[in-house]
Image (tube, rainbow, N blue to C red):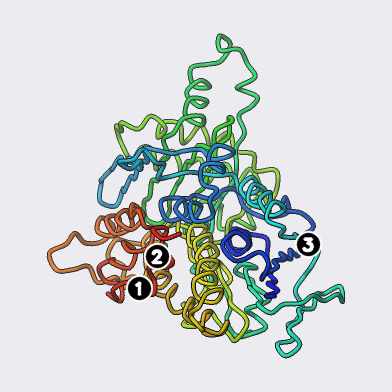
Amino acid sequence: MLNVAIIGGGPAAFAAAISIAKHCPASEVTVNVYEARGSLKEHVGVQYTLMYMGLNALDVLGIRRKILELIGHVNSPVWFIDQVRGESRKMDFGDEKGKEGWVHFERVALLEALAAELPVLNVKMHFLKRFASYDMAARRVTFADGTSAPADLLIGADGIHSTVRAMIDPSIKPIVPGNEGFYMTMDFSDIAAKSKESRTAQEQSILDFVNGNASVFSWAIPEMFGLFPLGNNRLCFFDSIDHEAQKTLFNGKTQDQAGPEEKRKGLLARAKAHRADLGPHPCPAIDLLPTLVEMVDFSAGEKKDHWVIKHLPLLEKTAYERIVIIGDAAHAVPPSSGYGAQSSIEDGAFLGLALRDRYFSSSGMSLQEVLHEFSDTRKLVIHPIHRISIYSNAAYIRKSPKEKLPVSLRPPAGSLDGMAWLGEVMLGSLMGVDGVKDVIAIPGSPGMPVPEKMRIYTPGKI
């Protein structure tokens, strides 16, 4: 019997639990999930975006349609507005089979939906269990409350501040690149409660947008706005700004120092300038940007609206004997490229397939060999994603278009340069139906072909 202990209560943890319980023989494996928080509602954050990579991972778990019908809000088309180059693109993310390609989920809703799958698969969820240590010889995990549990396999899926990763290598720390911003959910139920006849034209436009399907990304040096409809009269709003620009906006203060009214005035001025710089634009939501900023409630305090961008350094190794770290614990990236939740869910989903096809099979591979192969294989996907994410975040917070970026993606000769080329790379990778092969094929990535052993981790063979 393989006792699997999963530390964490996020997308990677739940995906791993579901995949292992669903794909591995029930008589030979038990799965327990241990979460430090008291409930999933205590998770910080607003929403998750899943595109083909993450949605195909839900296919691996066998719950894509169920999750989408329960809580997903399909967003297509998506407007990409690049003020640096003066370009706008309207992208449709549906595929030829009519499948969704760009879906937003409220964060807690997705976590609760994934957690609801666990009891059906005889996976136990334990709250208020903060990881303390792991005894490799005894194969037991110990928690801060003094209790312990069997763990033949320990999976660290406990986020960017992972205690499991810190036990292995305490020198690995999150990196703060220098930008932060606002990230929140806006609720317009009060407007929806009015009769249609009593709403103003602007109020009706807001409801049409937040319950519609068009998302907006609009970037200008050194910031980026995003408007993501969540349905049910709710909207995800974010704005990422570098520290120096914040001081200009907030009377010499940074976001965590500014008061509610200073935040409102500074961000409103920025939104108006952002809108004015665009000029006439076919996307109607752009006209709503200043109005939406004016309606934001900044009085709830820093925890509600403060969004500090962080990422991890690139890790060469994520498997250690009987321990494997996945998701943000292994490869947290800046969220500007939208890969975080997707790669986390894919990690967990493919880990279950790796154990099924390599450990619970006639391959003769030991658990350690399977985990190291899984780590090496995932690296082929994660390393290009990491480079793209660092590059794109740095591109947004440059002080000028000519500023050298810390990561070079080496655009091929004769290709588009700068943000336009980056957009082609990102969209090409996100549109890949397999969710894996196109990411590896990105120009400027290590250029490694997909090895035969990796094919067992693609949705094509579930």
Q: Nearer the viewer, residue 339 or 202?
A: 339
Distance of label 2 from label 1 (alpha carbons): 8 Å
Tell me the element at label 2.
Answer: helix
Residue 2, numbered label: none
Q: Residue at x 50, y 27 (%)?
A: 206
Is the residue marked by circle 2 packed among few (<14), some (14-19), or many (20+) residues within 10 Å? Answer: many
Assess disc 3: are there few (<14), some (14-19) or many (≥20) residues with their C-alpha within 10 Å of its C-alpha: some
Q: Is residue 312 left or right of residue 275?
A: right
For marks 2 and 1, the one nearer the N-term is 2
Label for residue 394? Answer: 2
Task: Tell me the element at label 3.
Answer: strand
Mark 2 or 3, which is nearer the eye? 3
Can residue 302 be seen here? The reply is no
| Residue designated by label 1 | 407
Amino acid type assigned to the residue bearing label 3 in the image: His
Does residue 205 appear anywhere in the picture? yes
Choose the circle earlier in sequence order: 2 or 3. Answer: 3
- In the rendered view, tell whether residue 63 sits above or below residue 407: above
Query: Residue 445: where, in percent of width, then height?
Result: 30, 72
Q: Which residue is mark 3?
A: 126
SS state under label 1:
loop
Of pointers 3 and 1, the one earlier in the residue sequence = 3
Measuring from the top left, give residue 265's x and y in whole percent: 55, 42
* Left or right relative to 397: residue 189: right
Label total for image: 3
Residue located at (62% from left, 68% from top): 157
- Residue flagged by tag 1: what amino acid is it? Val
